[in-house]
Image (cartoon, rainbow, N blue to C red):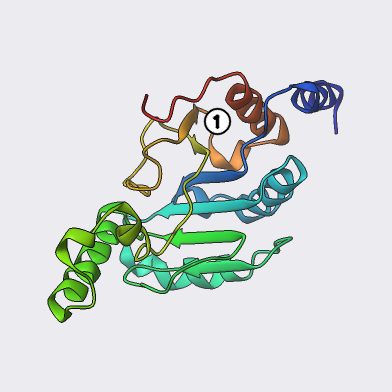
C-alpha cells in the first residue's frame, strides 16, 4: 500500500462515523472485457470486507444477452473471501450470500416479478389484499439487501440497478473506469460516505 493509500486508510479508520455495512457496485459488461477486470473485482471484495462491509452486491449491466453464459461462468470462478451467489436474467432464486452478483437482472424486471408473485398469493387466498405492504414485496425480491452505499464507475447512471432496494442508498459516482479502480478510489468512496449525513428520504 502506497503512502497516499495509507493516509486515506488512516482517515477512514479514524473517522467517527460508521462504515457502510452493505455496499454495492455497478459495472458493465464492457468493463469486464478489459484486461485485469476480474482481478480488480477480487481486490474490491477484499477492500470491502477489510473496511467494515458485511455484504457486497455487484450488478453487471448487460447489453448483449449472448454474453451472459460467459459472464456467469467467469464470475462464478472469481476468488472471493466469502460465499458468493451469482444470479442471471430471469433467475428468481433468492440470494442471501455475503457476496451477491446480478448479471443483467434489471431492477424493473426484479420488481415486476415480485409484484407478480404477490398478486398470485392474493389470488390463491394465502395473502389478504389489505395485508400487502413493503415487507410483503421485499419477501419476493431476489436481492433482499438495501445498500448503504452504491458505487458506480465510469458514468453517472445506475443502469436499472435495484430500484426498490437503493431508494435510500448513498450514491457515489467516479469517472475512473473499472479497469483502473484502485484501493484509493475505494477509500475515497468510503470517506465520502462517512462525511455525509444520511436522511433516508426525510
Residue 3 location (% of width, % of height): 86, 23
Q: Which structural element holds mark 1? A: loop
Q: Residue at x 50, y 25 (%)?
A: 198
| Rendered position, 14 above or below 110 | above
- Would you call the spot at circle 1 few (<14 residues within 10 Å), some (14-19), or many (20 or more)? some
Which of 202 and 169 lies nearest the eye of the viewer? 202
Where's the C terminus, which quadrant?
top left
Q: Residue at x 32, y 46 (%)?
A: 163
Horizontal arrangement in the rendering, residue 22 relative to residue 7 (left or right): left
* Residue 153 showing in the rendered view: yes
Residue 90 location (% of width, % of height): 31, 71
Residue 26 location (% of width, % of height): 47, 45
| Rendered position, 136 above or below 40 | below
Q: Residue at x 48, y 53 (%)?
A: 145
- Residue labelled with disc 1: 176
Q: How many marks?
A: 1
Residue 41 location (% of width, % of height): 63, 51
Q: Residue at x 31, y 47 (%)?
A: 160
Horizontal arrangement in the rendering, residue 107 relative to residue 195 (left or right): left
Which of 136 and 17 lies nearest the eye of the viewer? 136
Horizontal arrangement in the rendering, residue 124 relative to residue 199 (left or right): left
| Rendered position, 140 above or below 152 | below
Where's the N terminus, which quadrant?
top right
* Residue 29 showing in the rendered view: no
Q: Residue furthest left?
A: 123
Amino acid at each position: 500500500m502506497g503512502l497516499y493509500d495509507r493516509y486515506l486508510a488512516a482517515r477512514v479508520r479514524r473517522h467517527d462515523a460508521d462504515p457502510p455495512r452493505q455496499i454495492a457496485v455497478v459495472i458493465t459488461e464492457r468493463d469486464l472485457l478489459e484486461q485485469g477486470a476480474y482481478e480488480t473485482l477480487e481486490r474490491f471484495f477484499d477492500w470491502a470486507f477489510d473496511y467494515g462491509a458485511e455484504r457486497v452486491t455487484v450488478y453487471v449491466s448487460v447489453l448483449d444477452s449472448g454474453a451472459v453464459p460467459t459472464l456467469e461462468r467467469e464470475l462464478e470462478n472469481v476468488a472471493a473471501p466469502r460465499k458468493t451467489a451469482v444470479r442471471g436474467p430471469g433467475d428468481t432464486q433468492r440470494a442471501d450470500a455475503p457476496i451477491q452478483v446480478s448479471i443483467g437482472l434489471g431492477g424493473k424486471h426484479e420488481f415486476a416479478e415480485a409484484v407478480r408473485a404477490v398478486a398470485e398469493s392474493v389470488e390463491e387466498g394465502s395473502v389478504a389484499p389489505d395485508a400487502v405492504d413493503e415487507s410483503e414485496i421485499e419477501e419476493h425480491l431476489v436481492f433482499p439487501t438495501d445498500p448503504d452505499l452504491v458505487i458506480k464507475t465510469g458514468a453517472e447512471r445506475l443502469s436499472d440497478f435495484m430500484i426498490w432496494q437503493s431508494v435510500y442508498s448513498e450514491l457515489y459516482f467516479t469517472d475512473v473506469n473499472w479497469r483502473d479502480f484502485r484501493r484509493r478510489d475505494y477509500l475515497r468512496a468510503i470517506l465520502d460516505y462517512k462525511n455525509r449525513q444520511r436522511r433516508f428520504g426525510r
